[in-house]
């Protein structure tokens, strides 16, 4: 296990890099060129995603040469995720928002050790929110401690979910079936377009739950430690333990909402693992 002083250094570096990535996003906002499609017509990558990931990877390699990295833009095929300290990074989470200048876009930097998230930093320069979560140390937003909202059950919950970035017919049908099954049991459902910020919204008590099928490990790694350290719970959409390579998540402020939400979902979509 890394010492607490080593994790202090990791945390300081991650925050500095997140702020630097935020400056790069601000500088490029509204000027996105060279927009490419990846897995589908709504799965986009810009030169900013690639530039930020290259900057983050190069700085991390300089500072922590022995650490491993997994990143959205350099991921090809299966992620090599080991017990070694591994930075799991999304340079721009909410790329579609970024392209449209909708402000829910952020950089998401997570660190796992022995396959357990221990540090998460999520920064949105557009919302001016810097979220930090560290195992055993709680979570903060702009330096102030945050915690989940008390919510008595699904009927009182404001949820977040997403259509996601795939458009295969089966997947969209299952997502719509789940939406119909949940929508009339809750106060409301929102789609913000950034998995990392969705997790931070539950951590900050703006939302009571979030579920999604089809996201990736780099979308959830940092946000999940921020949420659990703010008092929330994460699991697979079935309610069983979360597997961050399995492309689905259920994240709530407490176990009651988690159980009721897991019981309400009618379709658990299986996707190719990261
Ligand atoms: C996407 C966003 C979106 C979610 C997708 C993710 P990206 O990440 O988090 O909210 O619905 O599943 O892939 O592609 O913008 O980094």
Image (tube, rainbow, N blue to C red):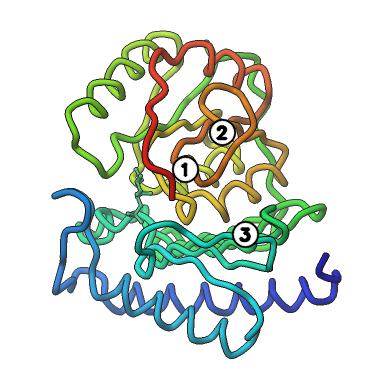
Q: Secondary structure at mark 2?
A: strand
Query: Which numbered disc covers residue 198?
Result: 1
Q: Does the numbered disc 1 mark a residue whose Cβ is under 8 Å from ligand 1? A: yes
Q: Which residue is mark 3?
A: 120
| Residue appearing at x 59%, y 62% in the figure | 121
Picture layout, residue 129 above or below residue 186: below
Q: Position of residue 229 (x, y in %)?
A: 72, 46
Q: Is label 1 or label 3 in front? A: 3
Labels 1 & 2 near each other (Cβ < 8 A): yes
Picture layout, residue 181 above or below residue 51: above
Q: Does the numbered disc 3 mark a residue whose Cβ is under 8 Å from ligand 1? A: no
Position of 43 compared to 245: left or right? Answer: left
Q: Residues within 10 Å of mark 1 (few under 14, many from 20)?
A: many
Query: Which numbered disc covers residue 267?
Result: none
Q: CA distance from mark 1 to mark 2?
A: 9 Å
Lower position in the chain sequence, tag 1 or tag 2 = 1
Query: Which numbered disc covers residue 251?
Result: 2
Lower position in the chain sequence, tag 3 or tag 2 = 3
Picture layout, residue 264 above or below residue 45: above
| Residue appearing at x 38%, y 64% in the figure | 75
In which quadrant will I find the N terminus?
A: bottom right
Lower position in the chain sequence, tag 1 or tag 3 = 3
């Amino acid at each position: 296990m890394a010492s607490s002083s080593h994790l202090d250094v990791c945390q300081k570096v991650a925050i500095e890099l997140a702020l630097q990535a935020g400056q790069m996003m601000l500088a490029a906002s509204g000027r996105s060129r060279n927009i490419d499609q990846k897995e589908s017509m709504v799965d986009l990558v810009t030169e900013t995603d690639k530039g930020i990931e290259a900057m983050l990877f190069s700085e991390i390699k300089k500072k922590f040469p022995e650490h491993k990295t997994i990143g959205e833009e350099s991921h090809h095929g299966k992620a090599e995720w080991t017990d070694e300290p591994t930075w799991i990074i999304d340079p721009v989470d909410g790329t579609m928002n970024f392209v449209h200048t909708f402000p829910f876009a952020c950089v998401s930097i997570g660190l796992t050790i022995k396959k357990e998230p221990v540090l998460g930093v999520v920064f949105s320069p557009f919302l001016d929110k810097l979220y930090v979560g560290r195992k055993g140390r709680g979570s903060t937003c702009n330096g102030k401690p945050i915690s989940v909202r008390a919510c008595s059950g699904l009927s009182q919950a404001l949820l977040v979910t997403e259509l996601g970035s795939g458009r295969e017919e089966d997947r969209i049908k299952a997502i719509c079936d789940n939406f119909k099954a949940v929508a009339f049991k809750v106060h409301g459902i929102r789609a913000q377009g950034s998995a990392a910020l969705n997790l931070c919204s539950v951590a900050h008590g703006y939302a009571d739950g979030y579920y999604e099928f089809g996201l990736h490990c780099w979308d959830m790694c940092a946000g999940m430690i921020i949420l659990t350290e703010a008092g929330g719970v994460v699991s697979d959409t079935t309610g069983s333990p979360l597997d961050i390579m399995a492309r689905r998540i259920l994240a709530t402020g407490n176990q009651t909402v988690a159980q009721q939400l897991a019981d309400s979902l009618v379709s658990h979509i299986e996707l190719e693992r990261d």
